Image: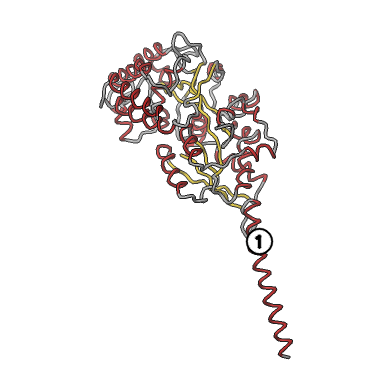
C-alpha cells in the first residue's frame, strides 16, 4: 500500500510539473504569436495624441476588430503639445507598456530610431510582401540607413481654410487657388473687423514654428535644416505685422492660454486659417455632431510670386512598433492593416488624406457629407509639388528644439527678427558641426 501510495504521489507530482512547464511554454508561445491572454484576447496599447480631435482613429480600429475580434486596441492619449516629451519618458525605461507608436513628426522619428526604441520592419515587410510603391515615395523618405522603422498611414499637406459666411457678410470675394502671400496678407487686413470679444480676425497663425517658417522653403532654394536662416526674415516680418495690427491673434496669448486653432476657426473667430489637410476630418465630424456651424471651404496653400500654385508643405504621419513590445506579431498585423489599403479606405471616409492615395480615395474624401461642394475646394487637393516639413536627419530632433526656441523668442518680441535669425543660424551651424 505504501509503495502504491508513493507511486501515485510521484505520478501526481510529474503531471503537475508537466502542466506547469506546459503553461510556461504556452505563455512564451503566446507572446511569440501575439501576446494573447488566457481568454484568447490580445490587448495592444497604442500611443496617440488628441484622440478626441482625431476623427479616423476609432473607425479604423473598429474596421480592424471586425476582421480580428480577439484584438483590443487601447489608446494611450497624450496631448499634442507634450506628445514627444512624454512618449520619450515612457519609452526611456525600456518598458513594453506601449506596443504601437504613432509617429508625429520627423524629429521624433529620428530620435526614437537613434535610441533604438523602434522595431525594424523590413523582415515583416518582406515576409508579407508589402508593396512600398503604394505609398507614392513617402515610405522611402522614412528610411534610415536603408532600414524602415515605420510605415506611413497619413500623408497630409497644407492648404488655406476660409470661413464662407464671414466673407459673405463682409461682401468680400473668397480666396482663390492662385493666391499669393502678398494677396493673402491684404485679404486678411481687409476682412478683419470688430473689437474685443466680437473681433473677427483676418487670419490665424497657430503657435507652431511651421506656420511662419515653412512658407519660406517653397521656392526650393532653402530647407529647414541649413546654416543660414536669413531667408525666413520676410515671413517673420509679415507675421509680426499682422499680429501688431490685430489682423491675427497675439502669439503670446495663444501660448499662455493653450488655445487650439480648431476652436478659433470653428467658433467663427477668424476668416482664414493656414493648416494641414488633417483638419478636414475634424471639421466634418464636428459639424455632424453639431458642435460647430462653421461654413468652410479650402483653397491651395498661398505661394510666392515665383512659385507655382499647388506647391505646398507635406507631413508624414506613420505607425511604428515599440522595440521592447512583447506582442510584436500582433502589433505588426494591426500596423499592416492600418497603413495598408483597407486602412486607407477607412481613413479616407473620415475626410482625412491617407498615405495610400488613388482617384478613388480622393473621390471618397470629396464626396463625404460635410466636405464643401464647390469645385474650388475639390481642386485644392490637387498639388503641384510637396516639400517635407522636416527631412530625416540624425540632427533633426536637436535642430527642432533650436527652431522652436528661437521662434518663440521672435514671436513674443523677446528678440528682434534679425537677432533671432542670427542666433538661430549660429546655433544650428554649431549643432551640424558636432
Q: Which residue is mark 1?
A: 25
In the picture, the quarter occupied by the C terminus is top left
- The answer to which of 313 and 289 lies nearer the viewer is 313
Q: Quadrant of residue 236?
A: top left
* Residue at left offset 70%, top offset 73%: 15
**Is residue 281 depicted above or below 112 in this figure?**
above
* x, y percent for residue 419: 28, 21
Q: Residue at x 28, y 27 (%)?
A: 412
Are there few (<14), some (14-19), or many (20+) residues within 10 Å of tag 1? few
Look at 55% across and 15% down and name the residue there.
Answer: 384
Where does the image place residue 50, in percent across and percent down from the top left?
A: 46, 39
Colour approach in the figure? secondary structure
When asked about the image quadrant of residue 124, the answer is top right
Q: Is residue 50 something that shows in the picture? A: no
Q: Quadrant of the N terminus?
A: bottom right
| Residue 128 versus residue 237 in the image, above or below | below
Q: Does the rendering let one see residue 325?
A: yes
Where is residue 429? Give x, y as percent.
37, 25
User: For the image shown, how many numbered marks are present on the structure?
Assistant: 1
Secondary-structure class at tag 1: helix
Amino acid at each position: 500500500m505504501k509503495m502504491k501510495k508513493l507511486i501515485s504521489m510521484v505520478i501526481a507530482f510529474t503531471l503537475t510539473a508537466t502542466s506547469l512547464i506546459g503553461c510556461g511554454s504556452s505563455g512564451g508561445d503566446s507572446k511569440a504569436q501575439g501576446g494573447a491572454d488566457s481568454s484568447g484576447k490580445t490587448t495592444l496599447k497604442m500611443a496617440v495624441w488628441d484622440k478626441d480631435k482625431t476623427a479616423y482613429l476609432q473607425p479604423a480600429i473598429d474596421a480592424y476588430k471586425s476582421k480580428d475580434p480577439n484584438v483590443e486596441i487601447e489608446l494611450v492619449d497624450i496631448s499634442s503639445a507634450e506628445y514627444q516629451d512624454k512618449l520619450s519618458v515612457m519609452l526611456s525605461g525600456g518598458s513594453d507598456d506601449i506596443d504601437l507608436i504613432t509617429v508625429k513628426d520627423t524629429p521624433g522619428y529620428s530620435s526614437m530610431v537613434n535610441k533604438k526604441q523602434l522595431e525594424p520592419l523590413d523582415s515583416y515587410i518582406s515576409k508579407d510582401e508589402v508593396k512600398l510603391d503604394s505609398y507614392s515615395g513617402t515610405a522611402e523618405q522614412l528610411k534610415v540607413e536603408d532600414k524602415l522603422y515605420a510605415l506611413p498611414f497619413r500623408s497630409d499637406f497644407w492648404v488655406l481654410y476660409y470661413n464662407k459666411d464671414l466673407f459673405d457678410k463682409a461682401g468680400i470675394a473668397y480666396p482663390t487657388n492662385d493666391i499669393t502671400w502678398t494677396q493673402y496678407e491684404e485679404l486678411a487686413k481687409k476682412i478683419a473687423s470688430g473689437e474685443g470679444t466680437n473681433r473677427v480676425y483676418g487670419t490665424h497663425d497657430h503657435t507652431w514654428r511651421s506656420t511662419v517658417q515653412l512658407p519660406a522653403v517653397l521656392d526650393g532654394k532653402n530647407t529647414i535644416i541649413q546654416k543660414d536662416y536669413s531667408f525666413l526674415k520676410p515671413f517673420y516680418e509679415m507675421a509680426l505685422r499682422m499680429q501688431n495690427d490685430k489682423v491675427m491673434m497675439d502669439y503670446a496669448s495663444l501660448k499662455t492660454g493653450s488655445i487650439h486653432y480648431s476652436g478659433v476657426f470653428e467658433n467663427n473667430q477668424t476668416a482664414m486659417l493656414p493648416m494641414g489637410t488633417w483638419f478636414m476630418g475634424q471639421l466634418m465630424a464636428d459639424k455632424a455632431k453639431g458642435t460647430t456651424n462653421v461654413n468652410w471651404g479650402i483653397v491651395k496653400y498661398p505661394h510666392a510670386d515665383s512659385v507655382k500654385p499647388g506647391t505646398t508643405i507635406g507631413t508624414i504621419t506613420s505607425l511604428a512598433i515599440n522595440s521592447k513590445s512583447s506582442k510584436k506579431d500582433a502589433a505588426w498585423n494591426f500596423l499592416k492593416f492600418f497603413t495598408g489599403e483597407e486602412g486607407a479606405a477607412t481613413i479616407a471616409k473620415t475626410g482625412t488624406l491617407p498615405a495610400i492615395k488613388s482617384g478613388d480615395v480622393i473621390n471618397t474624401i470629396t464626396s463625404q457629407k460635410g466636405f464643401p461642394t464647390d469645385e474650388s475646394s475639390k481642386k485644392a487637393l490637387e498639388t503641384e509639388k510637396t516639400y517635407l516639413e522636416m527631412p530625416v536627419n540624425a540632427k533633426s530632433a536637436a535642430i527642432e528644439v533650436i527652431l522652436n526656441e528661437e521662434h518663440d523668442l521672435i514671436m513674443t518680441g523677446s528678440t528682434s527678427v534679425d537677432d533671432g535669425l542670427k542666433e538661430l543660424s549660429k546655433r544650428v551651424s554649431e549643432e551640424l558641426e558636432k
